[in-house]
Amino acid sequence: MCGPLGAPWQFRRCDIRNKNKRIIDSGLVVFFEAPHSYTGEDVVELHCHGNPNLVDLVMVEGLSLGLKLAEPGEFTKRAFLNNKIDLAQAESVADLIAAQTEEAILAANNSLSGRFSEGINKSIASLVSCRVSVEASLDFPEEVPEGGVAEGLLLEVEAQISYLGSVLEAAKQGLKIREGFGVAVVGAPNAGKSTLVNRLAQDDLVITSDVPGTTRDSIRANINLSGVVVEFIDTAGMRKNPVSQIEREGIKRTQKAIEGATLVLHVVDANKRGGVDSINKNSIKVLNKCDLLDSIPLCEDGEVCVSAATGFGFDNLIELVLIRLGLSSSTETSLLSRRRHVDSLESALFFLNESASSLKKEEGMELVAENLLAAQKELGEITNPVSSDDLLGEIFSEFCLGK
């Protein structure tokens, strides 16, 4: 297809030809030599122009010569299987591709660089060292130094509990960023819900009108709030006596949006102070249209005064939303993480706390050894799980082709 390869790592201009030796395109070819390629294998990259029909023609010619299409995430999966990266780093490749904000990109790169894995691996090494001490004290009790090994072990176990506790908090923060948040915007008809969503998005995403009941269905918009992507759901207005079947269906969908939301913004016309019934959910009462009042009302805890028309009070609203979501505009997210990372860290901490408790109570070292091993296995599940066929299939199925 492209003639002889040049020296490794050097691009070479080439004519890309079909099986009849006719030139399809002029492009570049480069050879990445094992074991220093991304996958750890010999890799050849062929670069052609971006016309979709041309790309398709090049792929068809390759397939006719015996090549096969890559599965989703196949190159990153090969990199993992060839020990070029661990599983946490492989997952961060997918997170980096899917990142929608600068903060998410930086956090994914932190994980991809190996910072997260390095910390986990250091903890595993510490637990291995602790296990060696415990096993030695069990197998060779006559060699145990005066005073025993329990005191030193306890100090190290407690140090790991403290460190992994901080990692867990960072992982929970990263999980929130990765999974995203749903914020339902609810209120009576004509309270200004759609105008508020448009102001947050800084765009006319939702049709607005002075006529009550413009929004009949739930409209979703992903909005970047200080580096965090939040899905706002603009819902149909709610009132006790709907006038039509369509309005009743809209209210039903609003209630469903409330149930599935992380946070609810209860928008109220500040001139009327009326609205829907109290919401039994994590919520913020947003007093809208404050620009039409003679004076700004004193807001109670969990309330904020704004004007969706002018933008007044929106900095306060955004900060309160982030706080209620467990975030802050001043908080830096150090990594993106997965639910399985959080689960493994929580399990590891449970077993370490059990070990510490046994050491304090001077219970048998056999129990300490067992809990330390369990903690080590849980941490190992993050970077290099032992039984991973189903897990790998699930993880790499999220990737796009060619990654």
Image: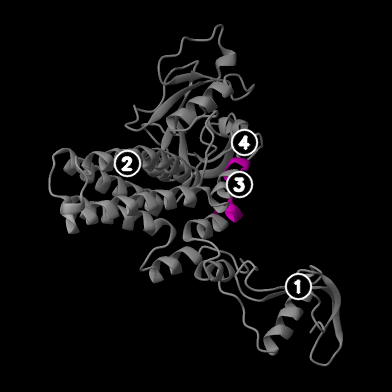
Kind of element beneath mark 1: loop
Determine which quarter of the picture holds residue 3.
bottom right
Residue placed most toward the observer, 133 or 95: 133
Write down the residue under mark 2.
Answer: 156
Q: Which of marks 1 and 3 is in front?
A: 1
> For the residue carrying disc 2, how many other residues have a C-alpha within 10 Å: few (<14), some (14-19), or many (20+)?
some
- Residue type at the position of mark 2: Glu
Mark sitting earlier along the chain (2/4)? 2
Q: In this view, does 127 lie above or below 195?
A: below
- Residue type at the position of mark 4: Ala
Q: Is residue 72 visible?
A: no
> For the residue carrying disc 3, how many other residues have a C-alpha within 10 Å: few (<14), some (14-19), or many (20+)?
some
> For the residue carrying disc 4, how many other residues have a C-alpha within 10 Å: few (<14), some (14-19), or many (20+)?
some
Q: Residue 313 in the image: x percent, y percent?
A: 57, 19
The residue at 60%/55% (across/down) is 97
Q: Residue 330 in the image: x percent, y percent?
A: 55, 28
Q: Nearer the viewer, mark 2 or mark 3?
A: 2
Q: In this view, does 355 lie to the left or right of 68?
A: left
Q: Nearer the viewer, mark 1 or mark 2?
A: 2
Mark sitting earlier along the chain (2/3)? 3
Q: Residue 331 in the image: x percent, y percent?
A: 52, 31
Mark sitting earlier along the chain (1/2)? 1
Using the image, tell me which numbered label, if any, was put on residue 27.
none
Write down the residue under mark 1.
Answer: 8
Q: In this view, does 357 lie to the left or right of 224?
A: left
Q: Nearer the viewer, mark 2 or mark 4?
A: 2
Q: Distance between the residues labelled 1 and 3?
A: 30 Å
Q: Which of marks 1 and 4 is in front?
A: 1
Kind of element beneath mark 4: helix
Using the image, tell me which numbered label, if any, was put on residue 105.
3
The residue at 37%/42% (across/down) is 164
